Image (spheres, rainbow, N blue to C red):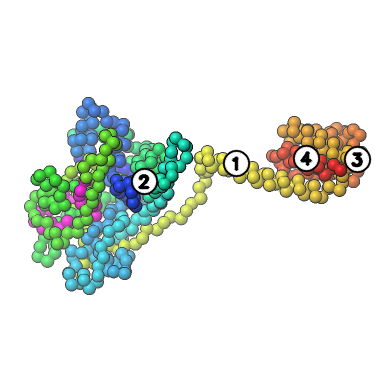
Amino acid sequence: MEKIQFRCELLSDIVLNASSATEGKRRSLDFIPGNNFLGIVASQLYKETDEAAWLIFHSGHVRFGDAHPSANGTRGLRIPASLFYPKLKGIEGGCYVRYLVEEDAARKMQLRQCREGFCTFGPEHIATQITVDKDFTVKSAYDSDTRRPMDNQIFGYEALCRGLVLLFSIEIDEEAKAYKDAIVKAICGLHHVGRSRSAQYGCVEIAECGFAEAATLQSPLHIGSRQYVAVYADSRLVFFDGYGNSTFRPQPADLGIEHGEIDWGRSQIRTFQYAPWNYKRQAFDADRCGIEKGSVFLVETDCMPPATGTVGCYLTEGFGQVVYNPVFLQGDKEGHSIFQFVKQEKPACEKREKGVDSSLVRFLQKRKEDAEKQNIIITDVNKFVEANKRLFKQDVFASQWGSIRSLAMVYEDEEKLKEIIGSRKQDEEGKGYINHGTASEKWDQRGRKERLWEFLENEELKGHLQEAVINLASEMAKICKP
């Protein structure tokens, strides 16, 4: 058996509903189930009459694991249900392994069970609580006939926020090893998972990436004079009894231990139930009832199982992953966990050097630049009008400004526009509109030319001089009229 490890980064928010219910509060999962990755590969490799389809998707020789949140390149694990903390102190104040604590001491401390979240368990006995950010968005149903939102059709999406990095693995047995390259090629790249994939949600990027697995102990667990094996549910577990019905009470053999007995008093079990949606048939399948990930079984036995294994049913979809005697379920004589729990440090936000490549962002940036440019033009034109309106209060200048406006409408090139109106260099040569003709003498009087030249040479107007001259000529023509 070969295990291939992958990294999945959320490029957008993703919606993974924990329940198929369409009313009430709709919570999102904080991990990506393995059946999502199975679906990605099946969409590219599945053929109904192909033997490869049977080996990859139906035989159980290829198992797509759940993607868990990560921290510092380490895959997180659901916090074990056997870890408890004293009331009002929190998990950071120290945890206890419940089956190592005497009943009297547990009642005195008023222990509370750890239930939510993922942790990474480092080699130096530091457990880091992974922060999984979620966002809630209110939506309105859309009426395609009227092209407007429907009345009284409001719903909400709780989603995992983009930027989250999750790690998962795919196990391939020898029987299906010939299809390894095809599976890796199909799973890597950009894909969409979850709900509302055609809208704004669901974009992920998957690539191969190695990571460390949870450490385990080869020695058995001793409580008093008895010997146990702790079975930690890394994923959800589904079991069936001898009559084909779902059961929450598996036998030791179902957990991969042939000889032994489950100590239900020391075990910590949480359950789940949901109805999976079959997209091909557009219908719900039968309810799946099973053991929630993070649950811990304590099996009294003399034999030692392997470090990890797969048990139960629906293994192809990521169910059935267990870890035997993990190091994070060890404690001292008083039941204290050997791990110290700390919160994940959020990295400081870094300013992006590259701009966002989005048509909407580019449009908004252009609108902002246009608004700033328009503000500069209006400010400079108003300053000129206010300072020089007394110099141009004559009828002859009304026609002069009208002609200047007409020239500005024709010439977009700024240097050419200056030459046509008349620049300082052309003054001696008598070229330019204001440097020759019957009105040139009036332009020479009272420094009128110098005032206009200063406006044309204003560095703030560089790049949009044409629009500035058009606005200036229009405003000055209004002042010149009686």
As measured in the structure, the alpha-carbon distance from the residue carrying label 2 to the one carrying label 3 is 74 Å
- Which residue, given by chain and number where applicable, does mark 1 sit on? 366
Q: Nearer the viewer, mark 2 or mark 1?
A: 2
**Residue 170 placed where, x, y %?**
26, 41
Instruction: Answer with left or right where residue 193 lies relative to residue 251.
Output: right
As measured in the structure, the alpha-carbon distance from the residue carrying label 4 to the one carrying label 3 is 20 Å
Q: Earlier in the sequence, mark 1 or mark 4?
A: 1
- Which residue, given by chain and number where applicable, does mark 3 sit on? 442
Q: Is residue 156 visible?
A: yes
Of the 4 image quadrants, the one containing the C terminus is top right
As measured in the structure, the alpha-carbon distance from the residue carrying label 2 to the one carrying label 1 is 33 Å
- Which residue, given by chain and number where applicable, does mark 2 sit on? 15
Q: Residue at x 74, y 36 (%)?
A: 414
Quarter of the image for residue 201 reads: top left
Circles 4 and 3 in contact, beta carbons < 8 Å: no
Q: Nearer the viewer, mark 1 or mark 4?
A: 4
Task: Name the element at disc 2.
Answer: loop
Span shown in magenta:
288-307
As measured in the structure, the alpha-carbon distance from the residue carrying label 3 to the one carrying label 1 is 42 Å
**Residue 122 placed where, x, y %?**
30, 57
Q: Earlier in the sequence, mark 4 or mark 3?
A: 3
- Depth check, front residue: 456 or 143: 143
Q: Is residue 362 magenta?
A: no
